[in-house]
Amino acid sequence: MKVTEAEIVISAVSKKQYPETHMPEIALAGRSNVGKSSFINKMINRKNLVRTSQKPGKTQTLNFYKINDRFHFVDVPGYGYAKVSKKERNAWGKMLEEYFTERENLKAVVLLVDIRHEPTKDDVTMYDFLKHYELPVVVVATKLDKIPKGKRVQHIKRAADKLQLEQEDIILPFSSETGEGKEEAWGVLKQFL
């Protein structure tokens, strides 16, 4: 997909703040520092529309990015970051649950996992949560450029096995550095738009 327009619309913490539109939305979920911001930037050919950070846990709101005046990418807070207070984590949990379970515009969730490591307990919990609510899930295995070519298949299989991916779900290897997997990701995501 050729992206000609991309802008942040709003950073929301509750449904009262969601954009009032019928545009489809694709949410991006994953552990803190897994590369959600880098994924969006690479997909839309922008260096820093979405701010990336070396410090995990920077995204604390639902950030709605309007793409080509056609759909929204929604960047959600990362999970699994220990330096966030329990109270803050609980608030994020409620905010995410409300969004994932009540937002009619939500058409699919991209669950990002780090291909270098086995998916975490939090990754498995998030996948199971999304499947429980019957949301379409596309798993994107980030940081592909960090794995030797000969070990990629093994790492992808390990991630799929750990998540116990259902047959209809897809796992896509992806590199924000090289752009590898970008065309395949657009190919899959277009079906939800």
Image (cartoon, rainbow, N blue to C red):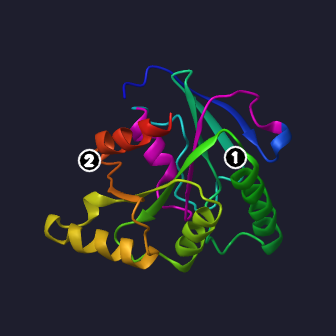
Total label count?
2
Residue 146 higher or lower than 20, as above or below: below
Which amino acid type is shown beneath numbered disc 1?
A: Leu
Res 158 quadrant in image = bottom left
What residue appears at the point 56 percent right and 30 percent down from the top-left corner?
A: 71
Magenta-span inclusion, residue 25: yes
CA gap between label 2 and label 1 equals 27 Å
Q: Earlier in the sequence, mark 2 or mark 1?
A: 1
Give the percent coordinates (x, y) of residue 113.
44, 64
Please report the bounds of the magenta region as a residue range: 17-44
Give the percent coordinates (x, y) of residue 191.
43, 38
Residue 118 higher or lower than 149, as above or below: below
Dot 1 surroundings within 10 Å: few (below 14), some, or many (20 or more)? many
Magenta-span inclusion, residue 82: no
**Numbered label attached to residue 110:** none
- Residue toward you, 45 or 164: 164
What residue appears at the point 82 percent right and 46 percent down from the top-left corner?
A: 14
Question: What residue would you read off at disc 2?
Answer: 180
Question: What residue would you read off at disc 1?
Answer: 62
Give the percent coordinates (x, y) of residue 53.
54, 53
Which amino acid type is shown beneath numbered disc 2?
A: Glu
Dot 2 surroundings within 10 Å: few (below 14), some, or many (20 or more)? some
Residue 23 higher or lower than 50, as above or below: above
Considering the numbered disc 2 on the image, is that residue within a helix, a strand or a loop? loop
Considering the numbered disc 1 on the image, is that residue within a helix, a strand or a loop? strand
Res 16 quadrant in image = top right
What residue appears at the point 29 percent right and 59 percent down from the top-left corner?
A: 144
